[in-house]
């Protein structure tokens, strides 16, 4: 997916310089994602600092950068709009606890089962959601949308759009921002292009006295150290009923994006991170973030790529990024208020363009139809529900399609008779999807009184496969036919209820594998 020419050797200098670069790039995105979530910019900046610092220290993937992200922000916005920011802080604490439990119970390993089409749908849906979230910046505050009274009332496009000169300035600044972010790296990489766009256009808007909204018009930022704050919510079952669904979704979204990013960095650096430790690190970060008035977060694909490409390899790079970001908050907070909102929208549009997998349009007609369906399905579910639900449904649908396709692959071949015995050879996987087809291919009425079934080229995968063998044995016993089951593993023999005595074990030729069944410890 990414082709980077990187230095695989650890260097303190590279880690420090890389961390500084990442910190500069974190500022605009943290503020932009705070707007997406509907909270104050400082809430996003504190989240970027706390989450980046703790995951860099306690996480399972050195060199990976975490902070406030769009995938979690789009889930938070509904909670903040309905219940207020204090409920968000309580939700983030619970989110962290759930993520810690996921690490303790070693659930991180299940990220390996996410198929590539699901990943494509995931990132495409995420890009669309972030794009739609930016549209509200083009609207008039406290003015009813143009779709009032329709099914689309309250949707991302149900806005009272700004018009006239403010709209033209807004669009112009967005386009210029995108051009700077895209083309500046071709000339110099001394300064991150996102930071350059902010500096250039903020200075231009200030000296040209352009009438456009700035961060200060939306929210005032008072820089200071984050302070401990217990969320001011009632401690009762109603509160838990409100925040638990959001916390569960946020925990799943955060871990999915973090573990997908971890897997990507593993491939690039040819090293291996620890997924369960990363779950615990993300959980600790979010738990602390909730108690320090911040919005929490997870791993950031874009910032992690910046860090890896800049030479960051160890935990030092993430720690440096977090410390530098805090310094920016303490010293430069008044300047952050001068940033035009249009510039942040332009930066987020570039994030959208970089996140969306445009190769999808090129390969959609070349890949199997089932994979194309999964990509589209996951993308749509991501847009209309949430990222975690989309990935879970995508994995389930992929598994069902896989089972359906492989159910057709179990083949029963009648071999030449041996010594007055009917011989069958079984090929393929015997599991819940293929067990019915397996049974249909035998007809005891037409067989001799002695039957041999050879499982040399077959694999019994689950309890349904075992039940199918037992059922087949019953059918042959009914017709008083002697049945021999050869080349089944000793584990299968132990688990077979009715046909176990029919298995003929050959310690030299028989396979050595475990059946996927709860009866095996």
Image (cartoon, rainbow, N blue to C red):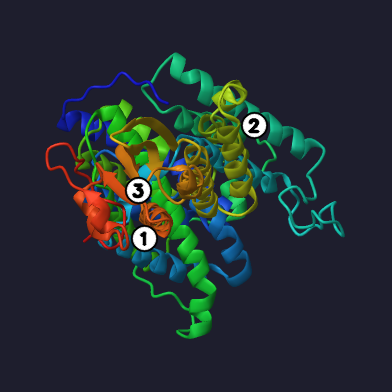
| Screen quadrant of the N terminus | top left
Q: Which dot, 3 or 2, sits closer to the camera?
A: 3
Q: Are marks 3 and 2 in contact (CB under 8 Å)?
A: no
Give above or below for 187 relative to 500.
Answer: above
Q: Toward the viewer: 443 or 460?
A: 443
The x, y position of residue 173, in whole percent, is 64, 31
Which SS class for mark 1? helix
Asked whether residue 426 appears in the rendered view, the answer is yes
Give the distance between the C-alpha atoms of the residues marked 3 and 1, in whole angstroms. Answer: 39 Å
Give above or below for 112 relative to 360.
Answer: below
Which SS class for mark 2? helix
Q: Which residue is mark 3?
A: 461
The x, y position of residue 32, in whole percent, is 53, 46
Q: Is residue 395 left or right of residue 326?
A: right
Between discs 3 and 1, the one toward the N terminus: 1
The x, y position of residue 88, in whole percent, is 49, 67
Query: Are there few (<14), some (14-19), or many (20+) residues within 10 Å of tag 1?
Result: many
Q: Which residue is mark 1?
A: 286
Give above or below for 309 relative to 53.
Answer: above
Q: Toward the viewer: 321 or 515?
A: 515
Between discs 3 and 2, the one toward the N terminus: 2
Q: How many marks?
A: 3
Q: Toward the viewer: 279 or 88?
A: 279
Q: Which residue is mark 2?
A: 173
Between discs 1 and 2, the one toward the N terminus: 2
| Screen quadrant of the C terminus | bottom left
Give the distance between the C-alpha atoms of the residues marked 3 and 2, in whole angstroms. Answer: 59 Å
């Amino acid at each position: 997916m990414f082709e980077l020419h990187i230095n695989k050797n650890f260097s303190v200098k590279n880690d420090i310089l890389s961390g500084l670069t990442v910190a500069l790039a974190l500022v605009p995105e943290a503020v932009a994602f705070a707007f997406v979530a509907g909270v104050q910019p400082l809430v996003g900046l504190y989240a970027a600092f706390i989450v980046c610092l703790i995951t860099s220290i306690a996480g399972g993937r050195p060199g990976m950068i975490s902070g406030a992200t769009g995938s979690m922000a789009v889930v938070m916005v509904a909670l903040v709009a309905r219940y207020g920011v204090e409920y968000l802080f309580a939700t983030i604490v619970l989110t962290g606890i759930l993520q810690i439990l996921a690490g303790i119970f070693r659930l991180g390993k299940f990220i390996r089962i996410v198929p590539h089409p699901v990943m494509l749908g995931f990132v495409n849906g995420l890009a669309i959601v972030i794009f739609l979230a930016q549209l509200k910046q083009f609207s008039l505050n406290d003015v009813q949308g143009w779709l009032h009274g329709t099914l689309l009332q309250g949707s991302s496009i149900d806005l009272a759009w700004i018009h006239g000169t403010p709209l033209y300035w807004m669009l112009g600044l967005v386009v210029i921002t995108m051009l700077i972010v895209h083309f500046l790296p071709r000339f110099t990489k001394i300064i991150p292009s996102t930071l350059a766009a902010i500096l250039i256009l903020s200075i231009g808007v200030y000296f040209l006295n352009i009438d456009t909204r700035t961060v200060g018009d939306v929210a005032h930022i008072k820089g200071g150290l984050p302070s401990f704050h217990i969320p001011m919510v009632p401690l009762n079952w109603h509160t838990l009923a409100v925040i638990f669904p959001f916390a569960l979704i946020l925990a799943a979204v955060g871990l999915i994006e973090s573990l997908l990013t971890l897997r990507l960095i593993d491939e690039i650096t040819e090293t291996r991170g620890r997924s369960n430790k990363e779950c615990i690190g993300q959980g600790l970060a979010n738990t602390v973030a909730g108690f320090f008035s911040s919005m929490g977060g997870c791993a950031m694909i874009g910032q992690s790529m910046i860090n890896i490409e800049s030479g960051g390899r160890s935990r030092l790079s993430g720690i440096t990024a977090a410390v530098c970001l805090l310094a920016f908050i303490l010293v430069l907070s008044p300047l952050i208020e001068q940033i035009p909102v249009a510039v942040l929208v332009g930066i987020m549009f570039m994030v959208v363009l970089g996140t969306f997998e445009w190769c999808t349009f090129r390969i959609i007609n070349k890949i199997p139809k089932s994979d194309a369906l999964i990509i589209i399905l996951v993308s749509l579910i991501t847009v209309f529900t949430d990222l975690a639900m989309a990935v879970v449904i995508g994995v389930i649908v992929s598994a069902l399609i896989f089972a359906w396709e492989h159910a057709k692959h179990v083949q029963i071949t009648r071999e030449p008779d041996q010594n007055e015995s009917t011989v069958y050879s079984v090929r393929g996987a015997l599991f819940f999807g293929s067990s019915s087809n397996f049974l249909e291919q035998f007809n005891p009425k037409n067989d001799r009184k002695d039957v041999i079934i050879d499982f040399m080229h077959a694999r019994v995968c689950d309890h349904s496969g075992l039940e199918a063998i037992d059922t087949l044995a019953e059918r042959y016993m009914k017709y008083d036919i002697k049945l021999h089951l050869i080349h089944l593993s000793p584990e299968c023999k132990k688990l077979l209820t009715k046909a176990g005595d029919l298995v003929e074990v050959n310690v030299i030729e028989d396979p050595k594998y475990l059946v996927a069944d709860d009866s095996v410890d």
